[in-house]
Amino acid sequence: MKTSGMLELPVLGLLKSRDMHGYELRKQLTAMLGPLWGVSWGSLYPTLRRLARAGAVVKLTDDPSVASSNRSGNQRRRTVYRLTPHGEKLFVQLLEETGAPVDQERFSLRLAFFRYLDPETRLALLERRRAYLQEKLAQFKANLQDYKGRMDRYSLSLQSHDMAATQNDLAWIDELIISEKESDNHARSD
Amino acid sequence: MKTSGMLELPVLGLLKSRDMHGYELRKQLTAMLGPLWGVSWGSLYPTLRRLARAGAVVKLTDDPSVASSNRSGNQRRRTVYRLTPHGEKLFVQLLEETGAPVDQERFSLRLAFFRYLDPETRLALLERRRAYLQEKLAQFKANLQDYKGRMDRYSLSLQSHDMAATQNDLAWIDELIISEKESDNHARSD
DNA sequence: TTCGTCATGTAATGGGTTACATGATTAC
DNA sequence: GTAATCATGTAACCCATTACATGACGAA
């Protein structure tokens, strides 16, 4: 099983809170990920099909949110999806991602569902992220050191900016770690 | 003709300075783009094939950099590529990219070859980038305004951080614009 | 002689983008 | 009545990743 694809995780995460159909999923996704991330139909529906084939979600032909009213026939045609127990497991698995280091986008996707993890796992993932960013930063520094003389102004500016951005990311992660530890302490002292 | 793909532009750009074979191209690419960008063979060689098929580069069976020495036979087998006039045109076309707004990665790839553009085009591209980032920023603000109340701490932190990063990008572009105008003035006053 | 680097590719797989196709309902 | 939104998909194309396959050369 590959279960790659960017959308698997957020789709499962949204379905965890309630059943939804494709159109609604897309609206939630664009709201959640910011309006720039264009989630296209040609990417969303195949993702749902894959998840259904893998047994992570099931199709419900009827929309259960309109239970009592709307009897006879002509409701809008919808395909509502529901998370299965196996889907729940898959979700956690994707969220914890013990695999290869991950780019900023995939990390963001994870972070958006951090509330579903227990505090220790959250901390562990944040620390791992921190280590990764630090390594990246070290590589930036080494690279700048080595090639500084041979780069033109544009490349130099670019590399410096990218390095600064990585430093910002790192500082942000540090904040998250601190606030995580704090709320952890508060919870313990209750 | 599509000519998409991330590697077309940097490959053409590198071949503009001198003929190179695939292996060398890869080394230059990883040095230039930072050591994180893993350029894989399965992506590089097909790119070269596409460029050759499009007439943007030609294969030179012999390596011209070792012109005088190494007569008889047993040199290492290499395929050296040279940019054609059509390749030059394609390069400028890709660099100016009058098309759709572009993500950070593609923009970085462009910026790394800005020295090949004339000052007015550089300024125009920077201004276009600036406008795009400002629009993105506005969307971030609107999105935060709308959904602030319904987001958990992680999503909120994420959106705020992304917005701050966009503001940093914007400030950086502004610096580039200013320094561009300055060197333009200096050039005029000569 | 064996390991690392130089050097060039192909094949399989899979996912994203874009365009295409369809049709019902709501609001003006 | 017509335009916008709701709603669901399919098909073609293309590109990136990964794994596979090969082989020469230099150094230890």
Image (spheres, coloured by chain):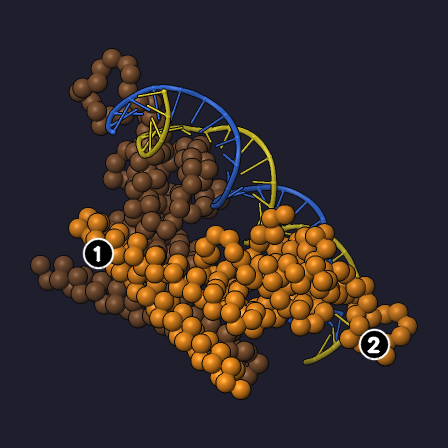
Chain colours: A orange, B brown, C yellow, D blue
Judge by depth and name the residue closer to the eye, C13 or A69: C13
Residue A179 x %, y %: 44, 78
The quarter of the displayed image where residue B170 is located:
bottom left
Of mark 1 and mark 2, the one earlier in the sequence is: 2
Q: Is residue B52 positioned above or below A29 on the image?
A: above
Residue that sits furthest to the right in the current view: A72
Residue B72 x %, y %: 24, 13
Judge the density around disc 1: few (<14), some (14-19), many (≥20) Cα neighbours within 10 Å.
Answer: some
For label 1, the residue is: A153
Q: Is residue A137 positioned above or below B59 on the image?
A: below
Could you tell whether A186 is left or right of B71 in the image? Answer: right
Q: Amino acid at mark 1?
A: Arg
Q: Please tell me which residue is depicted at 80% across the width and 76% down the height of the picture.
A: A66
Looking at the rendered structure, whether the residues under marks 1 and 2 are on a common chain is answered as yes
Tell me the CA gap for discs 1 and 2.
64 Å
Q: Please tell me which residue is depicted at 18% across the width and 65% down the height of the picture.
A: B182
